[in-house]
Image (cartoon, rainbow, N blue to C red):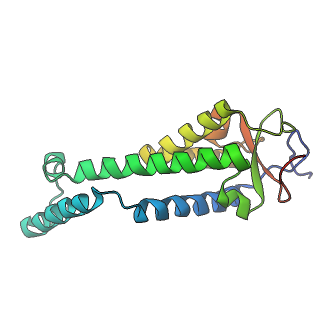
């Protein structure tokens, strides 16, 4: 059986390579989110600690209500953290794709993103990058179950496109020697 190839002749990236690259990218973004000195993180930690202490005292056998989580600021802290992570993740992905056609995780595994039908184009269009990044980051940070299903689609798709690739009309190819085109 021959390996599936994209328009520019490079083999399509395998699912495990894409998954490993995503793990590296999520780790990079997570590290930035954790070490970024966002002023309100300490306040969020204090609110969560207050809620957790009151929950333990009242008996952890009962699940907290949304009102309790809201009153202690736990939900605000979660939404704020997700918003910061979405912003940082989107910025990282967009800049990486526009400049290098790949993220650090994809670079580590010799992968790059190309337009589905025009793999010979040297640049990714800003519209493609925007569609890919927004769909991927929104799903990752806000609709995680849909993100997981979207990441499994390449296993059953002849063109090996994840949900965000389908939205952006992009593909991921194996191209370890990709560099500046001249």
Q: Residue furthest top?
A: 127
Above or below: residue 19 compared with residue 93? below
- Give the camera-side residue of 59 and 111: 111
Residue at the spot 65% in from the left edge and 37% down from the top edge: 129
Relative to 56, residue 65 above or below:
above
Question: Horizontally, is 40 left or right of 55 in the view?
Answer: right
The x, y position of residue 124, in whole percent, is 74, 37
Q: Which residue is drawn at 65% across and 62% down?
A: 20
Rendered location of residue 118, percent (x, y): 83, 33
Residue 90 can be seen, yes or no = yes
**x, y percent for residue 130:** 60, 35
On screen, residue 111 versus residue 19, left or right, reads: right
Q: Which residue does the image show at 62% across and 38% down from the upper left?
A: 132
The quarter of the displayed image where residue 159 is located: top right
Q: In this view, does 59 lie above or below 18?
A: below
Q: Which of these two is toward me, 71 or 83?
A: 83
Q: Is residue 147 something one can see in this rendering?
A: no
Number of numbered discs on residues = 0
Give percent across and percent down for residue 32. Answer: 48, 61
Q: Which of 76 and 149 is in front in this view?
A: 76
**Furthest residue in direction left, as rendered:** 58
Identified at 42% across, 65% down, the residue is 35
């Amino acid at each position: 059986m021959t390996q599936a190839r994209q328009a520019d002749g490079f083999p399509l990236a395998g699912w495990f390579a894409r998954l490993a690259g995503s793990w590296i990218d999520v780790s990079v973004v997570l590290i930035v989110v954790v070490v970024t000195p966002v002023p309100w993180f300490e306040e969020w930690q204090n609110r969560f600690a207050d809620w957790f202490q009151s929950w333990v005292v009242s008996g952890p056998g009962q699940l907290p209500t949304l009102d309790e989580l809201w009153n202690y600021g736990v939900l605000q802290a979660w939404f704020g953290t997700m918003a910061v992570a979405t912003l940082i993740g989107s910025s990282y992905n967009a800049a990486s794709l526009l400049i290098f056609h790949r993220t650090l995780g994809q670079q580590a595994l010799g992968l790059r993103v190309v337009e589905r039908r025009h793999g010979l184009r040297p640049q990714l269009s800003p519209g493609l990058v925007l569609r890919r990044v927004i769909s991927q980051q929104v799903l990752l940070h806000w609709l995680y179950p849909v993100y997981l299903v979207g990441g499994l689609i390449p296993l059953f798709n002849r063109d090996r496109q994840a949900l965000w690739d389908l939205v952006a009309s992009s593909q991921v190819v194996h191209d370890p020697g990709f560099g500046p085109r001249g």
